[in-house]
C-alpha cells in the first residue's frame, strides 16, 4: 500500500491529525515516562494499603494493652499475673512448678 493510498483512509487521517498526535504523545508520556506515572501510583497504592493494615493491627494491640492495664489496676489481679507469669511468691511460701513431658520444648 502506497502512502498516497494510505492518506485516503479514514483512520489514517484521524490518527495523523496533529491534535490527536499531540494527545497520544501526551498520554504516552504521562502513562510511562513522567515522574508520577501510573506504575508509581500503583506501587504507592500498595504501600498505602499495607500501612493501613499495620495501623489497624496496632490499633487492636493498643486496645488490648489498655484493657490489660485497666485489669492490672486491681492489686489481686496484679498479684495473680505476677505469680503465673514470673513465678513470684510471698515470704515463707514454697512454689512447686510441675511440667509435663509433652509441655517441654
Image (cartoon, rainbow, N blue to C red):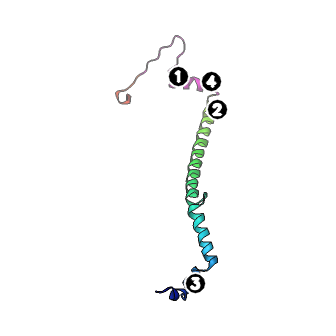
Residue 13 highlighted magenta (yes or no): no
Residue 36 picture quarter:
bottom right
Judging depth in this view, the residue of 72 and 5 nearest the camera is: 5
Q: Which residue is mark 2?
A: 70
Query: Which residue does the image show at 56% across and 51% down from the upper left?
Result: 47
**Label 1: which secondary element:** helix
Mark closer to the chain start, 1 or 3: 3
Query: Which residue does the image show at 52% across and 19% down from the upper left?
Result: 88
Counting labels gives 4
**Label 3: which secondary element:** helix
Residue mark closest to the camera, 1 vs 3: 3
Q: Which residues are magenta?
A: 73-97
* 18 horizontally vs 99: left or right: right
Mark closer to the chain start, 3 or 2: 3
Q: Which residue is mark 4?
A: 75
Which mark identifies residue 83? 1
* Above or below 29: residue 54: above
**Label 4: which secondary element:** helix
Amino acid at each position: 500500500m502506497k502512502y498516497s493510498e494510505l492518506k485516503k483512509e479514514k483512520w489514517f487521517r484521524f490518527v495523523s491529525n496533529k491534535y490527536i498526535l499531540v494527545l497520544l504523545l501526551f498520554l504516552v508520556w504521562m502513562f510511562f515516562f513522567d515522574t508520577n506515572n501510573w506504575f508509581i501510583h500503583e506501587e504507592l497504592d500498595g504501600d498505602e494499603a499495607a500501612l493501613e493494615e499495620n495501623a489497624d493491627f496496632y490499633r487492636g494491640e493498643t486496645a488490648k494493652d489498655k484493657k490489660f492495664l485497666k485489669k492490672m489496676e486491681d492489686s489481686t489481679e496484679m498479684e495473680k499475673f505476677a505469680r503465673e507469669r514470673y513465678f513470684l511468691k510471698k515470704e515463707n511460701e514454697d512454689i512447686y512448678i510441675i511440667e509435663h513431658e509433652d509441655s517441654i520444648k
